[in-house]
Amino acid sequence: MSMLYSCAVSSKVSTAETYRAADFSPAKMEEAGMAILPVTAGADLEGYRRPFGDELNRVAASTFEGVVPWDRTMNLLNEKGLVKEYQEAVQAYNETAILDKSITRQMADALGVRYLLYVRLAPPESSSDMRYDYVSGGAYQQQTKAVFAYAKVWDAQGDIVWEGSSEARAVSGAYSYINESIQEQCEKTANALVKRLAGLPVE
C-alpha cells in the first residue's frame, strides 16, 4: 500500500514594471529625496496594511538613501495641516487618474523631497475550490492565497515617473498545503516591490 505525503508550499513572487520615465532613475530619486505615503487599502484591513507598510519602510531604508518612512510622512503631514489635502489628492487620483500638482507640491515641500511613493493594496485573496485528483480518483480542496500591490512614484515637479506592481501568490495542490501567513505574503510583496523600483533582481 502506497502512502501519500503532504508538503508545504509558499508563495511565488512576481513583479512588473509598467512605466518608467526616461529621466527617472534610483540615483536621481536618492539625490532629490523620496517619501513613502501611507499605504492605502480597503476598510477594515489595518492588520493587512500595517505589516506591508512596515516592511516597505524597512526594505526601502536598506535600499535607498534618505527615504522618509510612511509613518514619518503621516506625522509631518499632520504637523503641516496637510492630511485633508493628502486624502483629497489620493481620492481624486483614484477616481480620475489625474494628479493635483498644487497639492503634491505642498506635500513634497513639507516633506523635503521631490518624489512621493504611492502604494495601493488590493484586498487579500483567499479562496478554496474543489478539484479532482486523477491519481487518487478523489476530490480535494485547492486553496489560493495572494497579496497584490500596485505602486506609482509621483514627481512633485511633474507627473507620474514610475509605476509597477508586485504579487505573492500561493496555491495548494492535492498533496500540498499553504504554510504561509498573510503577513508573510505582505512582507514578500513589499520586498519585491522595492527591489523592482530599484532595478534589482527579485529572488
Image (tube, rainbow, N blue to C red):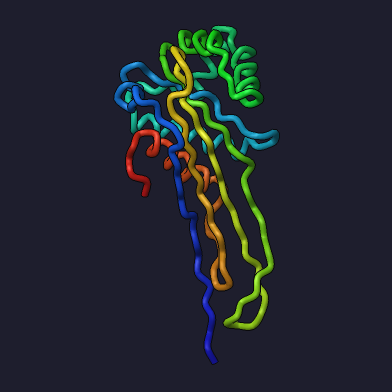
Identity of the residue drawn at 51% across and 46% down: 167
**Any part of residue 24 in sight:** yes
Identity of the residue drawn at 45% across and 15% down: 158
Towards the viewer: 137 or 5: 137
User: Furthest residue to the bottom?
Assistant: 1
Depicted 99 relative to depicted 125: above or below:
above
Q: Quadrant of residue 42?
A: top right
Q: How many marks?
A: 0
Identity of the residue drawn at 37% across and 29% down: 61
Left or right: residue 177 versus residue 16 is right
Percent x, y for residue 44? 69, 36
Towards the viewer: 161 or 139: 161
Left or right: residue 66 versus residue 11 is left
**Any part of residue 184 in sight:** no
Percent x, y for residue 122? 61, 39
Depicted 155 relative to depicted 48: above or below:
above
Identity of the residue drawn at 54% across and 80% down: 4
Percent x, y for residue 25? 33, 26
Depicted 56 relative to depicted 32: above or below:
below
Depicted 72 relative to depicted 63: above or below:
above
Percent x, y for residue 98? 58, 20
Quadrant (top left, top right, bottom left, bottom right) of the N terminus = bottom right
